[in-house]
Image (spheres, rainbow, N blue to C red):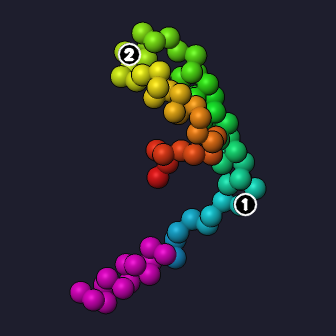
Amino acid sequence: MKGQLGFVSMSYHAHKAPAAPLWQRALKRVLHWHELARQRSLLASMSDEALKDIGLSRADIQEEIERPFWVDHLRR
């Protein structure tokens, strides 16, 4: 079994896709930051009733829009 495990993991690494070029990763990151800023702007423009419907308060939104554009707590 040990030999098979080594063979499987070696095969897996041999077929791993190469990383995207640096410029593509940078562009993707900047576009993601732009999307975060857009979403925060939309949240700030929502009415109190709409915020209540989604379970957020005006204080929650104020805290969110004060964060820097690069902070994304949902990113894994």
Q: Earlier in the sequence, mark 1 or mark 2?
A: 1
Q: Position of residue 36 (x, y in %)?
A: 60, 36
Query: Seen in the image, is 18 located left or right of residue 48?
Result: right
- Residue nearer the viewer, 12 or 24: 24
Query: Seen in the image, is 2 located left or right of residue 40?
Result: left
Cβ atoms under marks 1 and 2 closer than 8 Å? no
User: Disc 1 residue type?
Assistant: Leu
Magenta highlight range: 1-13
The question of residue 11 being in magenta is answered with: yes
User: Disc 2 residue type?
Assistant: Lys
The residue most toward the bottom is 3
Above or below residue 17? Residue 56 is above
Q: Position of residue 31 (x, y in %)?
A: 68, 41
- Report how far apart the C-alphas of labels 1 and 2 lie in the structure: 42 Å
Q: Would you identify the image quadrant in which residue 22 lies?
A: bottom right
- Checking the image for residue 53, the label placed there is none
Above or below residue 13? Residue 72 is above
- Checking the image for residue 52, the label placed there is 2
Q: Would you identify the image quadrant in which residue 52 lies?
A: top left
Please name the residue shown 63% across and 33% down the image.
37
The residue most toward the left is 1
- Checking the image for residue 22, the label placed there is 1
Q: Position of residue 45 (x, y in %)?
A: 58, 16
